[in-house]
Every structure is written in C-alpha cells, then in structure tokens.
C-alpha cells in the first residue's frame, strides 16, 4: 500500500462492521441458564472431579471485576470468585463455573452467523464469535449507525446473546472500534473521525502490533497510534520490514484489505420470529412462503444450487427442531422448496410456533445449467448432507420414508 489513493473502492467509501460477541462462551451459558445473568461466570476446563489442572476460556464481565482472566489457571481463577458460603449478604454475587461445551457454543455461533448472512452478502467469519461485514453496497454513512444498532438488537432478540459492533471505513479500525466500548458496545468511526479516533490509542491496539513490536515501538519513543502515524515511514520499514509500512498505514487509518468471505457459505437461510407463539396454520404458511421467497431469491441471484432443503421450528419455551430433506442432485427450484417445506411443517400441526426458518444447504456454486432430473436418477450420489444424514436419491419428491430427519433440541431461556 502506498500513501496515495487505494485501488478499487476508495477506503473512505467503504462501510465495514466488526461484530464481536461479548464474553461469548459465558453469554451462551447464560442463554440456557438465565439464573447466571449479572452473576460472575467462569467457563473453562479442568475443574471437573479428578482434574486439578485447567484454564479459563472466558469469564463474564462481572467475574473479570474480581480479577479473573482468560487463560488463567482455573483453580486460581475460582479462588478470586465469591462463594455462597463467603457472602455476608445473601443477595450478594456468587461465582459460577461451567465446563466448556463447544457443540452448544457452535450452535449459537451458527445462529449469529445466520443473522449476519441475512443482513449482508459480504461476511467474513473470523472465528466462533467474530465476523466482518461489508455493507458498502447497501448503505451510506447516514444509515450506518441505525443499521448497526438494529443488527445488535436483532442478534440479542433472535439469538439471545450480546454483541459489540464497531463500524469504520476499514477492517482494522472496525476491529478496534468493536473493542472500544465492550461489553454491549456500538462505536461508529466515520471517515472524518478516523485519525482523531486512532491518535490517542496505545500502539498495541493496532492490527499487526503484538507485544514484541509494541515494546520495540516504545523503545523508539512511539507510544500511540498518533505518534506512529507521524513517524517517518522509512524508519519503520528499516526496523520492521514491510510490516512497518502496514502498521504505519493502519495508524493513519488506511487499510485496503477487502472483506473477503472465507470459503463459500455452507447454507443459506432466513428466519423470522412471531411476536407471540402461534398455532394458526395460515400465519405459519404465510410466514414460510415469505421465507422461501427470501431464500430462493438469494440462491437465484447468486447462482447457487442446493441439494438439501430444511426447516427450523422453534416451539415454546425455546426448543429448536430442524427437519431436512435431501435430493439426489442439486437444484434451484423455488416450487420444489415450497412443496418440501410445506410437507416438512405438517409434523408441527397444532403446535405453537415462536420462530420459523427455511434453509437450503449442500450448496454448489456453479454457473453451469442445472442438470436434468433424469441424469441424477441414473447416477445417484451417495454423500452426506450437512446434518450428517445420508442423502436419499429420490429424484426430487419428498415422501415420508425417504425424508431425512434430524431433531436437535436445545433448551434455553
Ligand atoms: P474472545 O473474543 O477473545 O473473548 P470473549 O468472547 O471471551 O470476550 P470479549 O470479546 O467480550 O472480551 O474469545 C472468544 C471465545 O474464545 C471466548 O468466549 C472463549 C474462547 N477463548 C478460549 O477458549 N481461550 C482463550 O484463551 C480465549 C482468549 C478465548
């Protein structure tokens, strides 16, 4: 990168969100056990019977106030926490420990990512609890704060876990912004604000500056991003090589990395919640038809074919049921999606429904025309669908015994 203009979209015209879930594993534990809300919670490994060693994966912000940190030895961490027996005040805080349950956190993460993919086409999933979203194609800076606020609210209402969001004209500044006011933060840094926002920050907050580089920069008398921005670029390149140029750019609010989706999405889905649970078949059908329209509009726009069609049904209190049906070959056929979805929902007749989802998975990203059904029937594919259920070669029609079924019930309140 050089000092002049950037290739492609000028960075000041890009709007990048960095979404970072707050104390993610602890928030997941709170989702399924609301008695943990506002309590010090430590999630880790190695505190089970017979185990003496282990480390903290994360701690709620209440536990952090007692001195608990990620990667701390579990026994040391738990010693920081108040215990019921120690508490003078019976209503006072009591520390809680929960063992890591990755399968559950991954399922929550999947729900968060579903929301992100619904609001934007360009999503880069970085880790289980972190993603970049580029919304330059759909928003101006005027609309960015409201968009980010709505996204935060939506994740909270639909998934039940808190997120912090940073909005900026590039990835490195958006990441700093999401961390700036955690937890439950929302920080918007417009192109005009980027230099004053970065200037007072410690150099260690910048992308590409680890503890060793931060120490070296300090030894050069450079403590803040503002000081780094004003340092002669050649001095930095002499000392740190090409990375010296990069951190100089980041400190000056320049970062032309694109938000590139990692790999291709495994599924496309849309979900929608009712204000109150409903058993009304017409409302349920109408909502499903809307979701089918949304999903299939996206598949058609992006030339995506799918082999598996599924629904998600959330019944009170918060039981999540998924059903899916796999075809023998990929299609993009909205009428078929409708037939299969309406068939799958029949099982839930007369049951109250609080949320619905429609998902297509087992995706192929090809520009080639869809193969004919005859071809598939001659050479049925034996593979696994995304639910891990064997694919049934059925030529595209759903029947009771050919349908692949999977139920996963997660309880959370
Ligand atoms: P982080 O995003 O680093 O942090 P966090 O979600 O716990 O809290 P916050 O962003 O609000 O400061 O980590 C994401 C998850 O990764 C975290 O919830 C647990 C897990 N993790 C570990 O298992 N071990 C670790 O040492 C760290 C830092 C995180």
Image (cartoon, grey):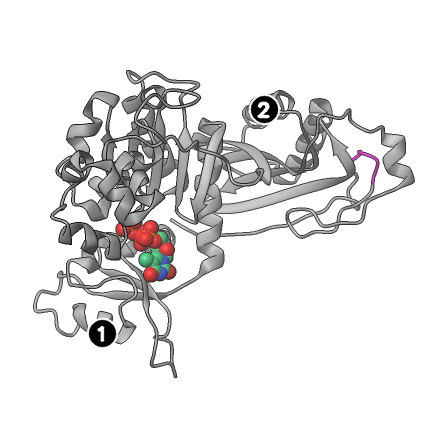
Q: Is residue 289 left or right of residue 37?
A: right
Front residue (pair 141, 220):
220
| Residue 46 highlighted magenta (yes or no) | no
Image x and y of residue 343, in percent:
70, 34
Can residue 184 be seen here? no
Q: Helix, strand, or loop for circle 2? A: helix
Majority secondary structure of magenta residues: loop
The disc label shown at residue 76, or none: 1
Circle 1 SS class: helix
Q: Which residues are magenta?
A: 394-398
Quadrant placement of the N terminus: top left
Residue at the spot of label 2: 298
The one of 51 and 220 positioned closer to us in this rendering = 220
- Depth check, front residue: 343 or 280: 343
What residue is shown at x 17% (from left), y 38% (from top)?
231
Residue drawn 32% across the image and 37% down it:
172
Q: Residue 65: name its quadrant.
A: bottom left
């Amino acid at each position: 990168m050089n000092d002049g203009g950037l290739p492609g979209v000028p960075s000041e015209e890009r709007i990048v969100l960095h979404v970072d879930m707050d104390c993610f594993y602890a928030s997941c534990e709170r989702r399924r056990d609301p008695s943990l809300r506002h309590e010090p919670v430590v999630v880790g490994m190695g505190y089970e019977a017979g185990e003496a060693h282990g480390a903290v994966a994360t701690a709620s912000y209440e536990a952090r106030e007692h001195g608990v940190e990620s990667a701390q030895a579990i026994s040391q961490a738990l010693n920081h926490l108040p215990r019921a027996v120690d508490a003078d005040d019976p209503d006072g805080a009591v520390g809680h420990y929960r063992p890591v349950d990755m399968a559950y956190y991954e399922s929550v993460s999947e729900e968060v990512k579903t929301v992100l993919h619904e609001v934007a086409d360009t999503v880069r999933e970085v880790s289980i609890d972190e993603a970049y979203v580029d919304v330059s194609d759909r928003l101006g800076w005027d609309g960015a704060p409201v968009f980010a606020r709505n996204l935060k609210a939506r994740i909270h209402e639909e998934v039940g876990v808190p997120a912090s969001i940073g909005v900026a004209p590039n990835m490195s500044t958006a990441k700093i912004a999401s961390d700036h006011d955690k937890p439950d933060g929302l920080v918007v840094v417009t192109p005009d604000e980027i230099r004053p926002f970065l200037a007072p920050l410690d150099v260690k907050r910048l992308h590409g500056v680890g503890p060793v580089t931060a120490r070296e920069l300090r030894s050069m008398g450079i403590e803040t991003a503002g000081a780094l921005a004003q340092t002669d670029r050649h001095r930095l390149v002499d000392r740190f090589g090409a990375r010296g140029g990069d951190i100089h750019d980041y400190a000056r609010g320049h970062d032309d990395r694109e938000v590139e989706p990692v790999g291709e999405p495994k599924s496309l889905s849309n979900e929608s919640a009712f204000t109150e649970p409903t058993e009304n078949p017409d409302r349920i059908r109408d909502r499903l038809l809307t979701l089918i329209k949304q999903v299939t509009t996206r598949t058609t726009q992006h030339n995506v074919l799918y082999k598996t069609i599924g629904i998600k049904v959330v019944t009170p209190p918060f039981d999540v049921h998924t059903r899916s049906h796999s075809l023998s070959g990929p299609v993009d056929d909205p009428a078929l999606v409708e037939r299969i979805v309406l068939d799958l929902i029949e099982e839930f007749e007369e049951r109250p429904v609080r949320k619905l989802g429609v998902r297509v998975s087992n995706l192929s990203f090809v520009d080639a025309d869809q193969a004919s059904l005859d071809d598939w029937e001659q050479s049925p594919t034996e593979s696994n669908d995304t639910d891990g259920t064997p694919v049934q070669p059925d030529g595209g029609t759903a029947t009771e015994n050919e349908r692949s079924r999977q139920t996963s019930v997660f309880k959370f309140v």
